[in-house]
Image (cartoon, helix red, strand yellow):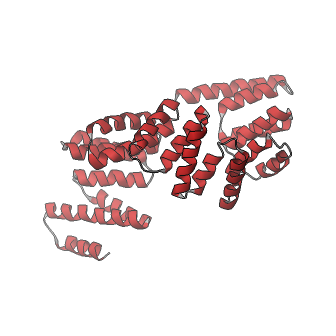
Amino acid sequence: MERIAELEEQLKKEKDKEKRNILYTTLIQEYYNLYKKYKNMEFLDRALSIANEIEKKNPTILNFLGLIYLEKRKPDIAILTFKELLSEYNLNNEDKNIILYNLSLAYFQKGELSNAYNTLKSLVLNSKEEINALSKKLLAKVCLALGEIKYVEEARELLEEFEIPSEDLAITYAALAKYYNDTKLLEKAKSIATVLGNEKILADILSISDNEEDLRKAIQIYEKLGDYNSQLKPLYKLSNRDPSLLVEILEKIKNLEDSKDKLNILYDIYKRTKIVQFLKEAIETAEKLQDYLFLARAYSELASYEEEVSNLRKAISFYEKYIQKNQE
């Protein structure tokens, strides 16, 4: 804080516009670094306030502005800021690559995965050293978020280059293990999670397993972490072998927040038992999640039990909402 006090004192005395801009830039950086260290939003707000006071913003200030908006979870403004930097200034390759990386972060935060993927693919080919390594790691995260098996395989290739255990590599091995039903990959995922000491990821990986011991260990870890929502998944898998567990599952599910896992389990219990109440509870959960495709199918199924015309109309209505949502 002494450094900040010193800079602000210099600003009060400095009259030269160019020198004041240098002081402003340094001050923004100091506040931003303090925010990154202590996660105190007051430091971030102060950095933003100073940046907005500057009439003519240089590339360094614009970059900080973009980063500040990223921290504030405002990726739209961050994207516009980084794009302005790239179009308005003749940056050298090193600086341009840094801005492209930051732009990729903004795309990723916003959920524009295709834009993030394409930007990072180009960046990996055209960058070196630290920014290249960072780009590969972020590209791996984007690939995992994209979800298709070809992208998960790409994430594996990228992460294995680093030859160090990471959470993303553990998740990648687990996803591939599930897709290929490969116990060796599952063991690799478990091993990495254990080395990292990340119990949540270890429990998530154990939940993929069909081994009873793994599933029971996952349940114990979730219990320890107080993650009762995630606990439901391995517990339900065990109920295929021990139907008596359904009573415990139904008791737990009443107190759980609405989620895709809860929805899938309720619907699967309905499919196993053919008790319509579970279908209705699944519909109630899907309505809260706004899962229109599931609602279209579920109401169509409910129509075979009751209020056929009314429920079929609902099914059609939700299917139209699903189509409209996917066209936006």
Residue at the extreme front: 184
Quarter of the view holding residue 5 = bottom left
Measured along the vertical axis of the image, is residue 233 above or below residue 13? above
Residue 297 percent location from the top left of the image: 72, 27
Measured along the vertical axis of the image, is residue 246 above or below residue 303? below
Q: Residue at x 29, y 51 (%)?
A: 63
Residue 47 percent location from the top left of the image: 34, 62
Residue 142 percent location from the top left of the image: 45, 40
Q: Is residue 147 left or right of residue 300?
A: left
Total marks in image: 0
Query: Toward the viewer: 52 or 152?
Result: 152
Residue 257 is at least partly visible in this image: no
Q: Is residue 290 left or right of residue 113?
A: right
Q: Residue at x 37, y 42 (%)?
A: 136
Query: Toward the viewer: 8 or 209?
Result: 209
Viewport quadrant of the N terminus: bottom left
Residue 7 percent location from the top left of the image: 24, 71
Measured along the vertical axis of the image, is residue 284 above or below residue 12? above
Residue 140 is at least partly visible in this image: yes
Q: Is residue 60 left or right of residue 158?
A: left
Q: Is residue 260 left or right of residue 21?
A: right
Q: Residue at x 43, y 41 (%)?
A: 140
Residue at the extreme bottom: 2
Query: Toward the viewer: 187 or 71?
Result: 187
